[in-house]
Amino acid sequence: MSAILELSNVSRQFGGIKALNDVSFSLHEGEIVALIGPNGAGKTTLVNAITGVHSPSSGKVVFKGEDVTKQKPFQAARRGLARTFQIVQPFPRMTVVENVAASALFGGNPESIAAARDRAMEELEFVGLGHVAETPASSLTLPNRKRLELAKSLAMGPKVLLLDEVNAGLNATEIDVALDLIRRIAARGVSILIIEHLMKVVLSLSSRVLVLHHGELIAEGPPQEMVHDRKVIEAYLGPKFAERFQKEMADG
Amino acid sequence: MSRKSNLTLIVMGLWVLALALAPSLLGNYEVRIAISIAMFTALALSWNIIGGFTGYPSFSTAAFYGIGCYVGALAQRSGVPAALAWVAAAAFVGGVSFALGAIVLRLKGHYFAIGSIALVDISRLVISSWGSVTGGGNGLNVPLLEGRPPEVSALVLYVMLGIMVLAFVTNVIVDRTRLGFGLRCIDQNEDAADMVGIDTTRYKIAAFVLSAIFPGAVGAVYASWVGYIDPTDSFDILTTVKVPVMAMLGGAGTLLGPVVGAFSFVMLEEIFWANFLEWNRAIMGAIVVVLIFFLPGGILRLDWKRILRRLSDRSKARSTDKGSAKE
Ligand SMILES: Nc1ncnc2c1ncn2[C@@H]1O[C@H](COP(=O)(O)OP(=O)(O)OP(=O)(O)O)[C@@H](O)[C@H]1O
Ligand SMILES: [Mg+2]
């Protein structure tokens, strides 16, 4: 397995705040890696740093062997490095299929607008939005908006997909559907970095977990180990609760 | 969808034909109005590309128009034939807008609007202070077009109509190609547009340049027509506000909206100029207010079917009322 995406010592400052501090990791081809961490840990900032929204202040991002540290977001998209937004970002006055066709047209390389539309329809069927293709994007329900985000990124034919809390706000049944969808995306050969708060999703999807806290990677390993890791529990609950939590776990 | 767009083309074709017939059917006064309509339609259609499709509220029209006036005039004064001077003005303004666009398009929303107005003032300042070349505040005489007055007006009308048609065709092409698709994405969500692979900077500059070249040509033709230009007239703030108002009055971002808007506005202005001279500007202000409150999408986006249905319902109701009153 070779690394398709590799970060070395990536930092990003906002004024005095170090939102990312010396982050290094790599994502291998075909892998699903989960990125977890408490609110404000810097997860979204990491996605922004990788895709050129807020380029790293220092450090290096390498994608498919190419240094892409200074790229613009549109270049990331065309290279096959796609992301979804934590806060969904549709084109509100376009239909669902037009939204996805835009991705296919500009992020992929179809021959024509008509070809982009065909491609968009395929992706809409894939994520289960075929039946609402012609409705305005602004009329979609939250779970469907999340799926639209997925269809938009898939239409660009990405090699790597960065998913920023695509399951937030979904109920239990909807999450099961979403899990199945993410597995099917991975089966297409797309490597995935998934930001997630729900342990169920982390445990059932990922082969490896990265834990971010105050902009630093504090732990990395298999999901079962991470949920019992002292540093990780501390990051989420604070040291006092972490102690009690671990005692209770130990006591059964 | 293609039926509707063919209808648009037919309507536009008939409209151009109607305007072109003015010199042979109507008098001097009407030809002047036709020239005014063609001119402002060309300006409004140009604005539509940056302001309508892309959603960037540009107030730079008068800058492009004014620079066009001066480039055309200076070229003609140094012996360049009129037609060539007009093309040169368009090309020069295209170049200027490319350079300025790269700067001012970094701004968004209100900031962009203010920046685009500043371009008008800066251009005027440069022209008025560069007296040795531009004649400064004294203005410039421009070689008059040859021919009897009616012939000259007819020629100017045809040239303005030509520019208007080019501006319209540009709108149609933009509307149907990936450029237009990309501009609409930028209008609706610029961050998302970037994220789906649109080189937003390049697209916005392209839109800005396309919205500049036709006003450049219009300005140059206008200069040849009137024979005299000065900085105050060429870089008129009122022009820069009027043009977006026209496009929005008809429907910004549509193909026929700027056409309908420019026509309605010019006609309203004629009526009010003729009848209440000193109220002219107040009326323009009133139109802006009405636009904002009652017609946010413009005339073409009104739900005409519903309005007609409601009117006919009401008149039916009235006749049945009368009927029941008699009983
Ligand atoms: N554009 C910005 N300007 C200034 N500060 C920012 C910016 N973006 C993020 N930050 C700061 O960086 C830190 C990390 O924020 P980030 O959004 O990456 O966290 P997160 O892990 O995604 O949190 P959440 O779980 O709430 O989504 C926060 O302190 C935030 O205030
Ligand atoms: Mg976040």
Image (cartoon, coloured by chain):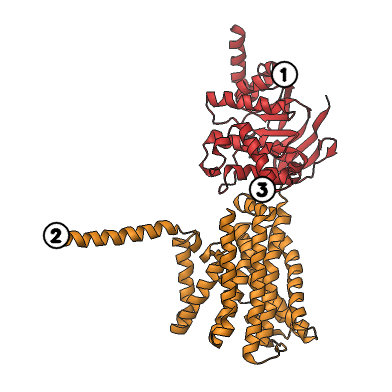
The chain letter corresponding to orange is B
* Foreground: disc 1 or disc 2: 2
B157 or A47, which lies in front? Answer: B157
Q: Is A138 on the left-hand or right-hand side of A232?
A: left
Give the letter of the chain under mark 2.
B
Give the letter of the chain under mark 3.
B
Give coordinates of residue B264: x percent, y percent: 50, 72
The answer to whether residue B312 of the structure is visible from this angle is yes
Give coordinates of residue B32: x percent, y percent: 57, 83
* Foreground: disc 3 or disc 1: 3
Badge 2 amino acid: Glu
Quick check: is the Cβ at mark 2 less than 8 Å away from ligand 1? no
Question: Which residue is label 3 attached to?
Answer: B193
- Say which residue appears at 65% left-offset and 40% top-offset: A120
The chain letter corresponding to red is A
> Which circle marks residue B327 in the picture?
2
Give coordinates of residue A55: x percent, y percent: 75, 43
Question: Which residue is label 1 attached to?
Answer: A222
C-alpha distance separating marks 3 and 1: 36 Å
